[in-house]
Amino acid sequence: MSPEKKNIRIPPLKGAERMFFMIAVLPFAKSLTRVFLTFPPDGSLQEAEIAETGSRLILFFIPVFTFQKQYEVRFSNGCSGQIEGLSKSEILQANRQLLEEHLVIRQTGFPVSNCPHCGYPLDQDFEYCPKCGTPLNR
């Protein structure tokens, strides 16, 4: 009678998107016993320890959990925002109007223009270019 084959399926961890893997090889020594033995060079009786030694392979599998996911929008002028209230699949299928309805601007005050003389990025409240000193007509 042949042994029955069974397919064992290990379900994935809920929420774990990736596994972080670490490996280590470390030496070990474990004392087994202490005995008296004859020491060969001079024939004297000496106390000796018998130990088990070797190397251990240690494997760590650490699940990586993602939480507090957000969908960030980065504009070419340096401003950023977030899409709120839509799932990832909705974002990927959404049209421009739907995305703009769910867009919340988080950071402004980044460069909104460049110096006409040297091209240095400028904030909107600058009166002079901080790099070359050119007065800005605003």
Image (cartoon, rainbow, N blue to C red):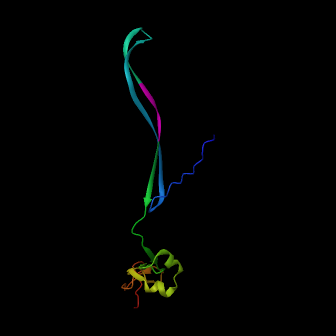
Residue 53 part of the magenta segment: yes
Is 36 rendered above or below residue 7? above
Vertical comparison of 63 with 68: above or below: above
Q: Which residues are magenta?
A: 51-57
In the displayed orientation, state which residue is furthest to the right: 1
Q: Position of residue 58 (x, y in %)?
A: 46, 42
Residue 3 visible in image: yes
Q: Is residue 116 visible?
A: no
Is the residue 61 above or below the residue 103 in the image?
A: above
Q: Quadrant of the N terminus?
A: top right
Q: Residue at x 44, y 59 (%)?
A: 64
Q: Nearer the viewer, residue 1 or 61?
A: 1
Residue 91 in the image: x percent, y percent?
A: 49, 78
Q: Residue at x 41, y 88 (%)?
A: 136
Q: Nearer the viewer, residue 112 or 121?
A: 112
Q: Is residue 12 left or right of residue 32?
A: right
Above/below status of 62 relative to 45: below
Placement of the C terminus among the 4 image quadrants: bottom left
Which of the 4 image quarters holds residue 65? Answer: bottom left
Q: Total number of numbered labels?
A: 0
Frontmost residue, 29 versus 73: 29
For the stretch drawn in magenta, the main secondary structure is: strand
- Where is residue 29? Give x, y as percent: 41, 31
